[in-house]
Image: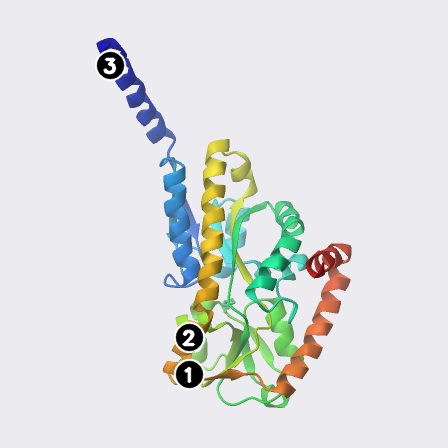
Amino acid sequence: MKLKAASALVASALVVVANSAIAETWDMPMAYAATNYHSEHGVMFADKVKEYSDGKLEITVHAGGSLFGGADIKRAVQTGQAPIGERIMSAHANEEPLLNWDNQPFLATTYEDSAKLWDAAKDTVNETLSDMNLVALYTCPWPGQGFYFKGAVESSADVKGMKLRSYNAATATVIESLGGTPVQIEAAELTQALATGVADGFISSGSTGYDRKVWEHLSHYYKVNAWLPRNYVMVNKGVWDGLDGDIQAALQKAADETGASCTAKSEELANWYFEQLEENGMSVVDAGPEFLAELKVIGDKMQAEWLSQVGDKGQAILDAYSK
Ligand code: PCA
């Protein structure tokens, strides 16, 4: 009995040694504010990974573009400078137009439709990411996109000549189509851009306006819910393929749970953000009919252009979505 107990002890000590020998730590750059729900869920994900991998994999989150700027995170993960990272997926659409699937104005404007669209797009998106040496672990939507301005806007006539901050190709296209000039700026640099007059407004959700306290510089938010773009947590494909099955399973379980929780949180916060903007003095209203009608025309054109770029793959996503 004694001998058995002793050898069991030795065996478990060996396991501890083995575990600590192979314990791996990953740095995870994230693009958005540390207090934003996306980043908070990144931390939740890291905690879960540690738990589900029995401490074999530890992830350290670096939010707010502090390790790599938002615009550099995808390349850092692709090239293995960082094994894992987070970014808004559609920022990569200039390289791979299919990744504009979730920036088609008025295609999916509710959380329910956003989930349906992701279901329809998931397999094709994952194939595209795989070709880019990336594996998506989870995605999480931003609330619906609308417009921030310095004053009242009724139609594109009021937007002409404005410098508006864009965060990807789709927002730049909308701004240009309205007669404005797009200026690509990371969310982390948005407050400064507004303060220094580099931008007079921007397209985003209530979330980013709240994070960046834009009421200090802007007065109006127009709700449009034009689309709900997704962030995603990506892993370098080579790194992923080299992981033990149990670590992959731990990452996937953590990812599935975190993605679901993050999505629910986004929906829960969507109106709360508007209330915060209002409490801080902004006018938060639905976009007027003239502006909306113009945006719908722009959206139709963007969807047609997207389909001509991505062909059957895009059409298949739209068909599966509208089924
Ligand atoms: N916030 C991010 C992307 C979409 C959103 O709602 C941003 O403005 O950068």
Q: Amino acid at mark 2?
A: Thr
Residue denoted by label 3: 6
Residue 48 location, quadrant: top left
| Residue 186 position within the rendered picture, expressed as x and y whole percent measured from the top left | 48, 67
- The Cα–Cα distance between marks 2 and 3, rounded to whole angstroms, is 63 Å
Residue 98 visible to an observer of this rendering: yes
Task: Answer with mark 2 or mark 3, whichever residue precedes in sequence.
Answer: 3
Given contact means CB atoms under 8 Å apart, are the residues at marks 2 and 1 in contact?
yes
Viewer-closest of 215 and 265: 265
Looking at the image, residue 213 lies above or below residue 121: below
- In the displayed structure image, the side of residue 123 where residue 147 appears, left or right: left
- The Cα–Cα distance between marks 3 and 1, rounded to whole angstroms, is 69 Å
Task: Answer with mark 2 or mark 1, whichever residue precedes in sequence.
Answer: 2
Residue 66 visible to an observer of this rendering: no
- In the displayed structure image, the side of residue 61 where residue 135 appears, left or right: right
Looking at the image, residue 257 lies above or below residue 23: below
The image's mark for residue 217 is 1
Which residue is at the far left? 2
Residue denoted by label 2: 191
Q: Quadrant of the C terminus?
A: bottom right
| Residue 175 position within the rendered picture, expressed as x and y whole percent measured from the top left | 61, 77
Residue at x 49% of width, y 37% of height? 249
Q: Amino acid at mark 3?
A: Ala
Residue at x 71% of width, y 68% of height? 303
Which of pointers 2 and 3 indicates the residue nearer the eye? 3
The image's mark for residue 42 is none
Q: Quadrant of the N terminus?
A: top left
For disc 3, the neighbor class at 10 Å (few under 14, some 14 to 19, many from 20) is: few
